[in-house]
Amino acid sequence: MFNSQVLAAELHPRQVRYFPQIASTNDLALTLLNQSAPTGTIVIADEQTKGRGRLGRTWYALPGTSLLFTMIFRLPQSSLPRLTMLGGLAVCETLQHMGIQEVGIKWANDVQIRGRKVAGVLPEAAWDGGKLTGAVLGIGVNVTVDFAASPFRDTAISVQDASDTPIDRLDLLKRILARLDAWVERLESDHLFEAWRGNLNMIGQYVTVEGRRSKAIRVDDDGALILSDEDGTLHRVIAGDILLG
């Protein structure tokens, strides 16, 4: 389990709010955002009881088996579409730098190892009378979750399963934060977009989205997926479940 004092010392001067158990790190981060918490503040927990995933799904893991945190950002509205890219790329690059093979990003919110989900990201924005006041980015990484006896044994994986050395959650957190910090200053840059796009693992493949089978041919500057039907008709997808094949 994490420890407030250790986290504060290791991540200084970043502001850190740690909880052994919390309903949702994103929910508290949004509250802190509205209370003027600075950019870079993180909320981290060993366990979430009402964690959210993409499309309103729940995210739950046994205490201490996942890395669960949310970072606060204050940014222009034009940068909002890039938050998902930022989170996925930061996790993807971290795992690659750790020597883990076959890491890629499944559009739009998942990071995969060997085609199995290892992490997800969830950005959420805060508004006041139609004006953006900031945003938060939730990141959940399977570190030592055992999926062997679960319904997800063929679709999910933990970092430890792909590593030859023990994974320390604090070390993993520091590595991901370093990548987030490195990219956030270039949030709207072509470099970030190209790096994210270069790690997508379904471009050029046939995918099924909401029952429609099409070929994923590219992503646009806002991160939307461009699909082509057999007759060449193009579709722009901004959200939805994707199945390969």
Image: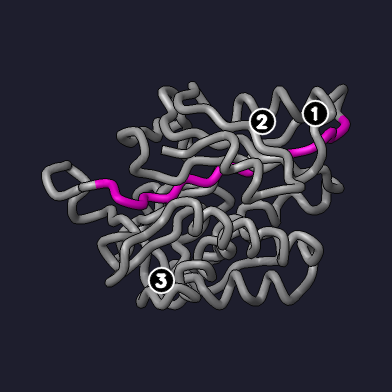
What's the residue type where badge 1 is placed? Answer: Trp
Earlier along the polypeptide chain: callout 2 or callout 1?
2
Of marks 1 and 3, the one in the foreground? 3
Q: Quadrant of the N terminus?
A: top left
The residue that label 1 is drawn on is: 127
Residue indicated by mark 3: 103
User: Which of the numbered marks, if any, corresponds to residue 29?
Assistant: 2
Residue at x 45% of width, y 68% of height: 95
Q: Nearer the viewer, residue 73 or 53?
A: 73
**Residue 158 figure quarter:** bottom left
Residue closest to the far left: 149
In this picture, which residue range is highlighted in magenta? 131-145
Kindly report the distance in space between the C-alpha atoms of the residues bearing marks 2 and 1: 14 Å
Prevalent SS, magenta region = strand
Above/below status of 176 relative to 64: below
Badge 1 marks a residue whose secondary structure is strand
Amino acid marked by disc 3: Val
For residue 5, above or below residue 201: above
Which residue is pictured at 36% across the width and 77% down the height? 101
Locate residue 232, reporting x and y percent.
Answer: 50, 72
**Would residue 177 be counted in the magenta stretch?**
no
CA separation in Å, label 1 and label 3: 34 Å
**Left or right of residue 170, residue 209 in this image:** left
